[in-house]
Image (cartoon, rainbow, N blue to C red):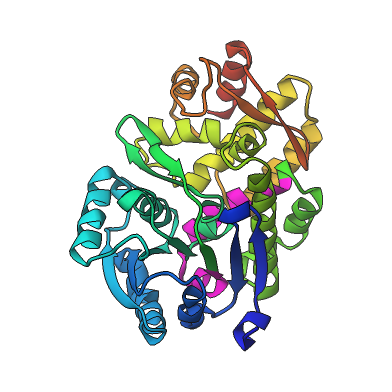
Amino acid sequence: MTGLETSMKTIEVVLGEKSYPIYIGNNILSGIGEFVKRLQTGPKIMVVTNPTVFGLYGQTVLDSLTGAGFEVCMGEIPDGEEYKSLESAKLLYDTAFDNGLDRNSAILALGGGVIGDLAGFVAATYMRGIPFIQVPTTLLAQVDSSVGGKVAVNHPKGKNIIGAFYQPKMVYADINTLNTLPEREFRAGMAEVIKYGVIWDRDFFDFLEQEYLAVIGLAPHQITRVVSTSCSIKARVVEEDETEQNLRAILNFGHTFGHSFEALTGYKKYVHGEAVAIGMISAAGVAVKLGMFSNTEKTRLQNLIRLFGLPEKFGGLNPVDIVESMYHDKKTLAGKVRYILPETIGRVRIVADVSHSVLYEVLAAQS
C-alpha cells in the first residue's frame, strides 16, 4: 500500500468480474498515474474533459499519466448538457481512431456528469467496449453519476435515452476539486446526497441536518463522509440490482418528477440537482396524500433542502404538462409510471401508478 493510499477511503463495488474500487481522498490527483497503471491496460489512453476542467486539473492528470508511462491523447468537449450528444460521441470516436486506440487502450473521464456519461458511452461502444476510468470533479458526479455504470447520451426526444450499463475499471475522486466548483453546482450535488439519506440511511440524513454548515464550508472530514457514505449506499444498491430490474429504481427518488421539470424548461432553467430537489418534495407530497408518509417528515425533508439553498417549487409549469411528460420518461413500464415514494426517512417504496387527481393536487400546491 502506498503512502497516498493510506490517506484514502476505498470502497469496493462487488460485481464479480466487473468489480472495481472507488478511491476517495484529498489532493490525490497527482498520484492517479500509478493507480491507472495497476489496471494493466494498454499504453494508450484518451482523456475526455472540457476546457474549464482541463484548465484547472488537466495538466496535473496528464503529467501523472505520462510519468507512469502512458501515451496520452486529449478528447476535449465544450462545457454543457447540450454537448452530451451523438455528435460529441462521433468526435471522440474520431479522436480515438486517429490516435490508434485499440481494445486494450483506456478512456479516462475527467469532469462532471456530462463528461462521465459521454466518455463512458464512447468507451462502451468503441470497438465493442474498452476500459473506462471515472475521475469525477463535481459533487454530483462523485456521489452519483460516476458510480454504477450508467452511461449515455441525450437525444432531442429524451434525456439519457441512448446508453448502456457499462462499469468503469476504477473511480478516483479527489474532494479537493470541489473547492473550485461553482456554488450552484455544489448545492445541486447535495440534492443527490440528501436522496441517499431518504432512501437508505436515516442516520446519514440526521448527520446532514446537524453538520450542514460544515458541509457547505467544505470541511474535509465532513465532505469525505458525504462522498464515501453516498458511494457506499449506491455501491450496495448496484450490487443487488446492476441493470435496474427492481431495487436500483429507488435511486430515482425525485428524478421522475425532476426529469419532467428539466425537459419542460428545455434543460435551461434548472441544473439536474435542482430539478431533483423539487422532485423529491413532489414525491414526498404524493406519499403524504396516499397516507404513506408523515407531514412531519415531509417538512424535515423540505427544511433540509432549504438549508442547502435548493429550490422547492417549479413555478410557471402546468401540472397537466408535467404529468404528461412523465409518461415519456424511459423509466415508464407498460404505460405505467413508477414512482419512488418515501414511507419514512431511510426507506422508500416503488409505486407502480398514482391517480392523476392526486398528482395534479400535489403539483398545483407546488407551482
- The reply to whether the magenta stretch includes residue 194 is yes
| Quadrant in which residue 119 is drawn | bottom left
Q: Is residue 312 visible?
A: no
Q: Is residue 54 left or right of residue 356?
A: left
Quadrant of the rendered structure where residue 46 is? bottom left
Q: Position of residue 331 (x, y in %)?
A: 52, 28
How would you classify the magenta stretch by its main secondary structure? helix
Quadrant of the frame with the N terminus: bottom right
State the residue at coordinates (34%, 36%): 266
Q: Nearer the viewer, residue 337 or 86?
A: 86
Camera-side residue: 58 or 1?
1
Q: Is residue 224 something one can see in this rendering?
A: yes
Residue 142 position (above or below residue 179): above
In x, y percent, where is residue 296?
80, 36
Front one among 143 and 317? 143
Residue stretch rendered in magenta on the structure: 173-197
Q: Residue at x 27, y 71 (%)?
A: 73
Q: Is residue 110 magenta?
A: no
Give the residue at x 62% y 17%. 353
Q: Give the percent coordinates (x, y) of residue 92.
A: 26, 56
Residue pictured at 21% horizontal, 60% vertical: 97
Q: Quadrant of residue 58?
A: bottom left
User: What is the total number of numbered labels drawn onto the structure image?
Assistant: 0
The image position of residue 175, as x and y in percent, is 56, 71
